[in-house]
Amino acid sequence: MNKVCVIGVGPGDDAFIAPAARQKVAECDLILGSERLTRLFDKPSQPLQLRGNPPHSIQFILANRDRARIGVLVSGDPGLYSFMGTLSRFLGRDDYEVVPGISAVQLAFARAKETWENALILSLHGRARGDLDDVVKRHAKLAVLTDDRWSPAALARYLLERGLEDREFIVCQDLSYPGERIWRGDVRSAAAEVFGEGALSVVLVIDRKRCKGSFTA
């Protein structure tokens, strides 16, 4: 039976697609993914459908993987908040393979010229606030994936209300795209800044006092 391949295709621009990812897509008979990702390749495709229980795309994969080599395209890296987590609940480890990609988080740290070996990576997509302020207090470096509800400015206002204004705030929007924007300032300035609506953003929140002169963040 064919192995399903989960392929990371980078943060957006096709210049960031790894040769190994291109090769694996070429070996597939069919690819599944968002329109933004599938249009990067000249290959028969279907949209990735997450509705249903199990999700419709999982049902399709289980029904067709014995007669077709199926590739699942995910943005960034498959190991970071991707469909791979869902797929792994329905397939055994020997039933799929993974091709890594450059994540938006990785590119954000590169654009900001910051190391990230000790950073906490957190997604706010569709999530409640919870104990976010405690998380920020406990970590010197965070990479936060925001959404329309949790925009960079909303995150900054949340931190400002909780007295966490002494952090550096770096907003990386639309990474790798022509409209890419890197904004660097403090929490108070970010709370009043206007950031593009609907833009894909990674926010780096850094406590410089704890990072300086330390091997642990």
Image (cartoon, rainbow, N blue to C red):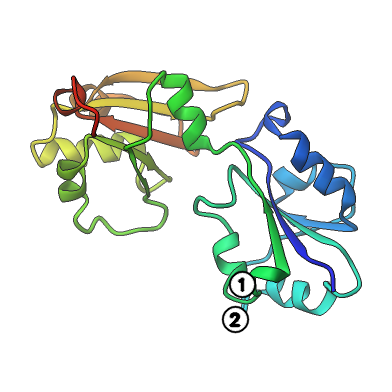
Type of amino acid under label 2:
Asn
In the visual, does 68 lie left or right of 72?
Answer: right
195 displayed left or right of 13? left
| Classed neighbour count for the residue bearing mark 1: other residues with Cα under 10 Å, few (<14), some (14–19), many (≥20) | few
Q: Mark 1 is on which residue type?
A: Arg
Image check: 134 left or right of 19?
Answer: left
For image coordinates 10% across by 42% down, the residue present is 162
Residue depicted at x 25% and y 55%: 129
Q: Residue at x 18, y 25 (%)?
A: 188
Q: Nearer the viewer, residue 207 or 57?
A: 207
Q: Quadrant of the N terminus?
A: bottom right
Residue 173 visible somewhere in the drawing? no
Q: How many marks?
A: 2
In the depicted structure, whether residue 214 falls above or below residue 141: above
Residue at image coords 88%, 51%: 27
Label 1 sits on a secondary structure element that is loop
Residue 186's image quarter?
A: top left
In the rendered image, the residue lying farthest to the front is 215
Question: Is residue 3 shown to the viewer in this render?
Answer: yes
* Residue 51: mark in rendering: 1
Indicate the position of residue 203 as horizontal and vertical percent values.
36, 34
Q: Position of residue 135 (x, y in %)?
A: 21, 48
Local crowd size for mark 2, using a 10 Å CA cut-off: few (<14), some (14–19), many (≥20): few
Image quarter of residue 118:
top left
Against 171, is 90 above or below? below
On screen, residue 42 versus residue 127, left or right, reads right
Closest to the observer: 43 or 190?
43
Q: Position of residue 40 (x, y in %)?
A: 79, 39
| SS at badge 2 | loop
- Which disc is residue 53 wearing? 2
Q: CA distance from mark 2 to mark 1?
A: 7 Å
Position in image of residue 153 (x %, y %): 30, 34
